[in-house]
Image (cartoon, rainbow, N blue to C red):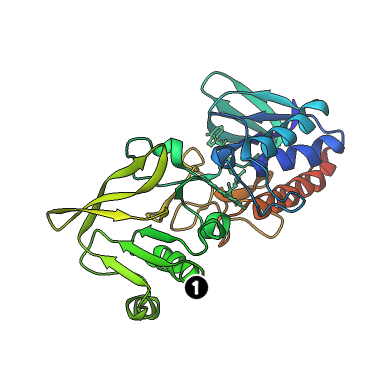
């Protein structure tokens, strides 16, 4: 039996693993896709303390090497269910069942995408989701924000001071964010808004991102920008965890020690109900969950 099973090998899950392994615990990480989670798709990270600039792959590979050296168990399997049986947790995957004293859920979330041709190639190089992550790459440049809800307007307002222009592409006939944000956006001369507009494709020339083709109320138009921020929502990867309490957007609720609504099941990172989803908050959550697990395990000594 494992001391702790960690579901997800993003920065949150691997940080938890690091803390538990250094305390000599037997740990298994289960990952359904690939090592590193979301950040592995980013070519440039410039806000992770200690690195001026590092690729997501290098950052997560370093952390993986660190936990592997400490003897971490690791399997590529998708977790389908966690069950509490007496004082054990039984974790069922697509191919196995495992037992542990405690579980940390670190399954992250996904940004909704436009799902257009060549999207994967330009994520981090023209296509962004998070202004705290990539906003600084667009100082004095033209950008577009896709979406007209509150998150999109917050991104537009964050970008407006340092960029040359911000173009909002909204599929409805109005912006749906908070009235105060709508007012700030609509009154700002650097902002242009295309209502009733859908993005049809990306404009790529000489392998560089150059903008969008949109359909605005039946008319095709080109929007030439250096980069876009897609803000059409996120999806929490929490579907398998049906017994645990979640917020209205399906993110897992937890106490201050990152324990979920069930004793012995903890949560870390972007799948937790919280306001800020960043690498540093993911690793911070991973630390808190791991230390809470260490305290929880004391009852079995
Ligand atoms: C393109 C991009 C660029 C970004 N840039 C920055 C940046 O510059 N700075 C910054 O601070 N933040 C950035 N972020 C945000 C940052 O990546 C996340 O906040 C952070 O990586 C979240 O880590 P996590 O471990 O919580 O989740 P994730 O990285 O989402 O990892 C979760 C892992 O769990 C796995 N998983 C999900 N469900 C299951 C299951 N049922 N069974 C097994 N495994 C499962 C997933 O496959 C995934 O590998 C960026 C995000 C993206 C998408």
Is residue 221 shown to the viewer in this render?
Answer: yes
Res. 14 image quadrant: top right
Picture coordinates of residue 232 (x, y %)?
37, 54
Picture coordinates of residue 226 (x, y %)?
42, 54
Nearer the observer, 148 or 27: 148
Q: Going 79% across and 48% down the picture, which residue do you hit?
A: 291
Q: Residue furthest left?
A: 218
Picture coordinates of residue 274 (x, y %)?
57, 60
The relative height of residue 77 versus residue 219 in the rendered view (above or below) is: above
Image quarter where ligand 1 lies: top right
Q: Element type at marker 1?
A: loop
Q: Going 35% across and 76% down the picture, which residue do you hit?
A: 182
Is residue 176 shown to the viewer in this render?
Answer: no
Q: Residue furthest front?
A: 206
**Residue that mark 1 sits on:** 161
Picture coordinates of residue 56 (x, y %)?
62, 40
The reply to whether the residue tagged 1 has its Cβ within 8 angstroms of ligand 1 is no
Q: Quadrant of the N terminus?
A: top right
Is 45 situated left or right of 248 in this image?
right
Q: Going 32% across and 44% down the picture, which residue do you hit?
A: 203
Is 76 situated left or right of 205 in this image?
right
Q: Going 74% across and 49% down the picture, which residue do you hit?
A: 51
Nearer the observer, 220 or 177: 220
Res. 98 image quadrant: top right
């Amino acid at each position: 039996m494992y001391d702790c099973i960690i579901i997800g090998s993003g920065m949150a899950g691997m940080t938890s693993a690091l803390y538990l392994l250094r305390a000599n615990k037997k740990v298994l990480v289960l990952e359904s896709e690939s090592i590193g989670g979301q950040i592995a798709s980013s070519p440039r990270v410039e806000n992770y303390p200690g690195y001026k600039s590092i690729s997501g792959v290098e950052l997560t590979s370093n952390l993986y090497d660190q936990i592997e050296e400490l003897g971490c168990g690791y399997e590529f399997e998708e977790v389908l269910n966690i069950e509490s049986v007496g004082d054990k947790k039984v974790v069922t995957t697509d191919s196995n069942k495992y037992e542990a004293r405690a579980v940390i859920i670190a399954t992250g979330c996904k940004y909704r995408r436009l799902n257009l041709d060549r999207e994967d190639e330009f994520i981090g190089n023209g296509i962004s989701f998070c202004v705290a992550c990539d906003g600084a790459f667009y100082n004095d440049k033209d950008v577009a924000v896709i979406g007209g809800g509150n998150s999109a307007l917050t991104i537009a307002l964050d970008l407006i001071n340092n960029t040359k222009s911000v173009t909002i592409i909204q599929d409805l006939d109005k912006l749906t964010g908070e009235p105060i944000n709508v007012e700030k956006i609509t009154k700002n001369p650097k902002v242009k808004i295309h209502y009733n507009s859908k993005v049809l494709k990306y404009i790529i020339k000489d392998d560089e991102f150059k903008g969008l083709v949109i359909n605005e109320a039946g008319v095709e138009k080109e929007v030439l920008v250096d980069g876009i921020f897609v803000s059409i929502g996120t999806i929490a990867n929490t579907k398998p965890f049906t017994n645990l309490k979640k917020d209205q957007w399906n993110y897992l609720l937890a106490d201050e020690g990152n324990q979920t609504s069930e004793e012995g099941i903890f949560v870390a990172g972007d799948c937790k109900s919280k306001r800020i989803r960043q690498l540093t908050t993911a690793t911070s959550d991973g630390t808190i969950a791991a230390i809470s697990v260490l305290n929880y395990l004391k009852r079995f000594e």
